[in-house]
Amino acid sequence: MKLLLRRDIPKLGLCGDVVEVTAGYARNYLLPHHLALEPTPTNLKAIEKDKVIAAQERERIRGVLKQTASRLVGVEVTIMAACTPDGHLYGSVGPREIAHALMEEGHSVHTDQVKMSHNIKEVGTSEVAVVLADDIRTTIKVWVVAEKRAGALGEESETEVTHAGSDTAAASAQPTDAGRPGA
């Protein structure tokens, strides 16, 4: 079924385009949401105003995306993740975590704009592509660092005390009732 688009629809066409779609897509989505019309000569003339408005909106969005890309040049984000002592992550760092880290730094990047061939599974640095539009791309540096565990500090100090070789130092490492009144 041929329809005339009234709005830009991703992966289908731009405002004013005559496109071929299935009857169900036209009947159930495009026509009820007033996103398309039948391509009659009257509708082709009436759509001219919508085409101008859509073109202006595309240019405005394109300008915003270019500004975002220029702000992302040289950006580095650090993501803390739990890992083994060898540096292998228990999970992985993917587009969702990277987009979230960029949002926390004030950059408006969505998960689907972060392009990765595979998730990051080890501690280290990686270059990650951010594709804001088909021809607007940039690269950011992602640092994945080991997450500090709460028990790690206590374990180190206890290990240091027991290796001191002194009985009094080892005894002082034992928990006491210091919070009890009169102790």
Image: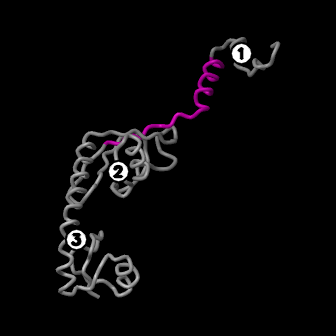
**Mark 2 element type:** loop
The tag earlier along the polypeptide, 3 or 1, is 3
- The image position of residue 172, as x and y in percent, is 71, 15
> Three-letter amino acid code at disc 2?
Val
Query: What is the crowding at mark 2: few (fewer than 14 residues within 10 Å), some, or many (at least 20)?
Result: many
Q: In this picture, which residue range is highlighted in magenta? A: 141-163
Q: Which residue is mark 2?
A: 109
* Residue situated in front as seen by the camera: 12 or 51: 51
Q: Tell me the number on the disc at residue 50.
A: 3
Residue at point 35%, 88% (across, down):
23
Q: Viewer-nearest of labels 1 and 2?
A: 2
153 falls in the magenta region: yes
Q: Quadrant of residue 75?
A: top left
The tag earlier along the polypeptide, 1 or 2, is 2
* Residue situated in front as seen by the camera: 23 or 180: 23
**Mark 3 element type:** helix
Query: What is the crowding at mark 3: few (fewer than 14 residues within 10 Å), some, or many (at least 20)?
Result: some
